[in-house]
Image: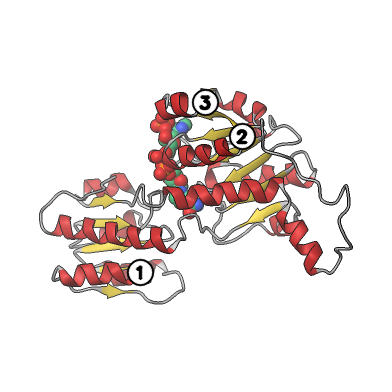
C-alpha cells in the first residue's frame, strides 16, 4: 500500500497490525505526477492527500489498486467517475474534521471583523501609544446576518458557533436543512438574496462541476460594502480575481481565506491587502482531527482489502 504523505503514525500502525506492507512518502514536498504514479502503480491501495491530482492518467497506471482513501472530506482531486469505471472504491474522512474547520471559519470571521492583523501589527511595530476612542474600530457580530453557502456539516457547525455570538443565520443549499430551520431558526434563501443580505458570508460547498465559480463576479457584486467573505471550502468555488478587485477598491470590508484558486500559489495581490487573512489550508489541522482522519483512512483500506464495505465511501 502507498501513503502519499507523512500521516499521523496511527495509520501506519493500524495497517501494519492488519498485516499490510506500507510504503510512505515522508518527503514534505508535494509529489509530482511521475512520483505519484511510481509510488502507487503496484499498490493494492492508496491513501492520498487532497494535493494529489488523481486523474485518468494516474488511475490508468494503478494496475492493482482497489481503494483510494482520500485523507480529506473533499475529493475534488480525484476523477471519481473514472475510478468507479475502473472498479476502484474511493473513500473520504467526513465528520471528524467538521468542528476543527468550523473553528477556523469562526476564527477568520472574528479576525476580519475585529481587525486582528492590523491590531497585532500595530503593537509589534511599537505604535501602540495607549487606549484611544477610535483605535482600530471593527464591526460587531451581534444581530448581524451570517449567510452560509453550502448548508452541510461544516456549514452547520459554523452557523452554530455564529449563533452563539448573536448572529442571525440565512443559508443557501439545494435542499432544505432541518437543523438549520429548526435549531438555528435559519431561513433558506436564493444565492443572490444571500449575497445581498448577509453581513458575513461563509462558503462551505464541495467543489465539483456544479459549484465551480458559483460565487461569480455577478454574485460578488451584490455584497454590501460593510460585508465580509470567508472561504474555507475550495478556492475554485469563487471568482478570486474579482473578489480581489472588490477588496482593492474597498467595496467590501474584508475577507478571510484558508483555500485558494491556484493552491499552493497565492495571488500576489492578496498578499498586499490589509484586512485580508490568509491561512495555509489548515481547516482540519488539529492533532485530534488529523489522528481521526488517519484512523478512518486506514480502516477504509483495511475493510476494502479484506472484502468488507468501507466505513466512509463517497
Ligand atoms: P457536506 O456536509 O457534504 O456539505 C456540503 C453542502 O453543500 C451540502 O449540504 C450540500 O447541500 C451543499 N451543496 C452541494 N452542492 C451544492 C450546489 N450545487 N449548490 C448549493 N449547495 C450545494 O460537506 P462538509 O463536510 O460540510 O464539507 C464541505 C466542504 O468543505 C468539503 O467538500 C471541502 O471541500 C471543504 N473543507 C475544507 C477544509 C479546509 O481545510 N479548509 C476542511 C474540510 C472540508 P445540498 O446537497 O442540499 O445542496
Q: Is mark 2 within 8 Å of ligand 1?
A: no
Classify 114 as above or below 189. Answer: below
User: Which residue appears at 45% of the width and 56% of the height?
Assistant: 284
The answer for how far apart the CA atoms under marks 1 and 3 are is: 38 Å
Residue under circle 2? 166
Residue in the foreground of this view, choosing between 255 and 144: 144
Q: Residues within 10 Å of mark 1 (few under 14, many from 20)?
A: some
- Which mark is on residue 280? none
Q: Position of residue 105 (x, y in %)?
A: 55, 47
Residue under circle 3? 186
Is residue 224 shown left or right of residue 106?
right
Residue under circle 1? 8
State the image quarter where residue 264 is shown: bottom right
Q: Mark 2 falls on what kind of element? A: loop
Classify 254 as above or below 5. Answer: above
Q: Residues within 10 Å of mark 2 (few under 14, many from 20)?
A: some
- Marks 2, 1: nearer the viewer: 2
Asked if the residues shown at circle 2 and circle 3 are in contact, with their CB atoms under 8 angstroms apart, the answer is no
Q: Residues within 10 Å of mark 3 (few under 14, many from 20)?
A: many
The reply to whether residue 218 is visible in this rendering is yes
Classify 39 as above or below 182. Answer: below
Amino acid at each position: 500500500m502507498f501513503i502519499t504523505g507523512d500521516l499521523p503514525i496511527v495509520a501506519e500502525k493500524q495497517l501494519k497490525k492488519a498485516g499490510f506492507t506500507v510504503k510512505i512518502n515522508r518527503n514534505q514536498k508535494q509529489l509530482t505526477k511521475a512520483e505519484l504514479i511510481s509510488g502507487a502503480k503496484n499498490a493494492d491501495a492508496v491513501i492520498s492527500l487532497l494535493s494529489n491530482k488523481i486523474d485518468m492518467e494516474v488511475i490508468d497506471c494503478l494496475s492493482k489498486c482497489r481503494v483510494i482513501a482520500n485523507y480529506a472530506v473533499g475529493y475534488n482531486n480525484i476523477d471519481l467517475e473514472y475510478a468507479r469505471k475502473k472498479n476502484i472504491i474511493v473513500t473520504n474522512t467526513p465528520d471528524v474534521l467538521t468542528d476543527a474547520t468550523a473553528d477556523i471559519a469562526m476564527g477568520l470571521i472574528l479576525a476580519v471583523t475585529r481587525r486582528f492583523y492590523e491590531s497585532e501589527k500595530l503593537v509589534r511595530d511599537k505604535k501602540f501609544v495607549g487606549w484611544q476612542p477610535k483605535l482600530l474600530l471593527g464591526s460587531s457580530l451581534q444581530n448581524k446576518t451570517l449567510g452560509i453557502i453550502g448548508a452541510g456539516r461544516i456549514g452547520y457547525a459554523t452557523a452554530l458557533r455564529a449563533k452563539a455570538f448573536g448572529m442571525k443565520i440565512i443559508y443557501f443549499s439545494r435542499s432544505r436543512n432541518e437543523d438549520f430551520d429548526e435549531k438555528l431558526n435559519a431561513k433558506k434563501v436564493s444565492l443572490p438574496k444571500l449575497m445581498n443580505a448577509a453581513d458575513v458570508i461563509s462558503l462551505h460547498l464541495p467543489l465539483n462541476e456544479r459549484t465551480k465559480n458559483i460565487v461569480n463576479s455577478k454574485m460578488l457584486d451584490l455584497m454590501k460594502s460593510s460585508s465580509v467573505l470567508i472561504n474555507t471550502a475550495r478556492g475554485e468555488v469563487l471568482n478570486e480575481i474579482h473578489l480581489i478587485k472588490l477588496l482593492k477598491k474597498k467595496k467590501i470590508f474584508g475577507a478571510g481565506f484558508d483555500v485558494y484558486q491556484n493552491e499552493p500559489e497565492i495571488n500576489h495581490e492578496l498578499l498586499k491587502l490589509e484586512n485580508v487573512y490568509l491561512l495555509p489550508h489548515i481547516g482540519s489541522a488539529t492533532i485530534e482531527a488529523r489522528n481521526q482522519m488517519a484512523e478512518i483512512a486506514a480502516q477504509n483500506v483495511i475493510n476494502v482489502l479484506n472484502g468488507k464495505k468501507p466505513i466512509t465511501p463517497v
